[in-house]
Image (cartoon, rainbow, N blue to C red):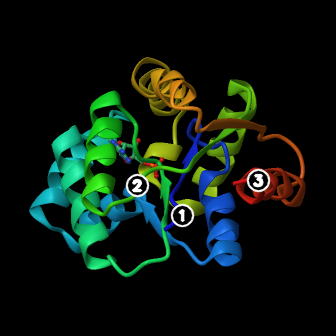
């Protein structure tokens, strides 16, 4: 199994680069944001609960997302590996993920961090909001709240993965293909 985390703030290009990495390495994509939006669209109890957090730009409670990831991994136990996109976002999520992966006799091999400046991220998200219809991409105060959550709760994970030697940062500004090539170079070094 090859397990990658695509790490970075909202709007860094995690979704775009995940799709390309999946194609190149035959991995299963786990995006907790996509899973939560699917629950919301289906009108499930979980989706309704999550909506209250998502629309304010706050993180959904750890146990909710960890439960979703556990189910997804069990349903896809025959995968070549996983690419985690938007997960983990807190230290307890990262610890739960380590535990889950050890149940599958595997681990995180590489954490690829997309590094982009905040003003560029706000521009990208507002632009995406015009076409995606995502409630949390529509106004600047919700977007800024998502960055605050990222700074306070998610960014500390960078040092968590630096300590285990799995974190590699990549410049996330520039051409999509150039960024993809830089990501692939790290995967191919494994
Ligand atoms: P994303 O599509 O990854 O930008 O996620 C959109 C929103 O879903 C986030 O702003 C959070 O409200 C929620 N969300 C997605 N993934 C997680 C996660 N791993 N932990 C907590 N909340 C999450």
Tell how many labels. 3
The mark found on residue 189 in the picture is 3
Q: Is residue 170 left or right of residue 148?
A: right
The mark found on residue 2 in the picture is 1
In the image, is residue 113 above or below residue 150? below
Q: Residue at x 44, y 44 (%)?
A: 136
Q: Is residue 168 left or right of residue 140?
A: right
Along the line of sight, the residue nearer the viewer: 124 or 186: 186
**Residue most extreme to the top:** 152
Q: Earlier in the sequence, mark 2 or mark 3?
A: 2
Query: How packed is label 3: few (under 14 Cα within 10 Å), some, or many (20 or more)?
Result: few
In the image, is residue 22 above or below residue 108? below
Query: How packed is label 1: few (under 14 Cα within 10 Å), some, or many (20 or more)?
Result: some
Q: Quadrant of residue 181?
A: bottom right
Q: Earlier in the sequence, mark 3 or mark 1?
A: 1
Badge 3 marks a residue whose secondary structure is loop
For label 2, being within 8 Å of ligand 1 is answered yes
Q: Residue at x 58, y 51 (%)?
A: 129
Q: Quadrant of residue 57?
A: top left
Query: How packed is label 2: few (under 14 Cα within 10 Å), some, or many (20 or more)?
Result: some
Report how far apart the C-alphas of labels 2 and 3 lie in the structure.
29 Å
Which residue position holds label 2?
33
Q: Quadrant of the C terminus?
A: bottom right
Instruction: Give percent across and percent down for residue 35.
Output: 34, 64
Q: Residue at x 18, y 49 (%)?
A: 64
């Amino acid at each position: 199994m090859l397990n990658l985390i695509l790490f970075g703030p909202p709007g860094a290009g995690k979704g775009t680069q995940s799709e390309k990495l999946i194609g190149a390495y035959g991995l299963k994509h786990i995006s907790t944001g996509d899973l939560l939006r699917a629950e919301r669209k289906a009108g499930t109890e979980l989706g309704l609960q999550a909506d209250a957090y998502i629309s304010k730009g706050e993180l959904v409670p750890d146990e909710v997302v960890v439960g979703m990831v556990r189910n997804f991994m069990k349903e896809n136990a025959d995968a070549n590996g996983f690419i985690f996109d938007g997960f983990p976002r807190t230290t307890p999520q990262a610890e739960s993920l380590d535990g889950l992966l050890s149940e599958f006799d595997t681990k995180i091999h590489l954490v690829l961090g997309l590094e982009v400046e905040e003003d560029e991220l706000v521009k990208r998200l507002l632009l995406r909001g015009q076409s995606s219809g995502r409630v949390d991409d529509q106004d600047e105060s919700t977007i800024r709240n998502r960055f605050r959550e990222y700074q306070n709760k998610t960014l500390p994970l960078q040092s968590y993965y630096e300590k285990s030697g799995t974190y590699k940062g990549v410049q996330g500004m520039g051409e999509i293909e150039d960024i993809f090539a830089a990501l692939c170079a790290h995967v191919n070094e494994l």
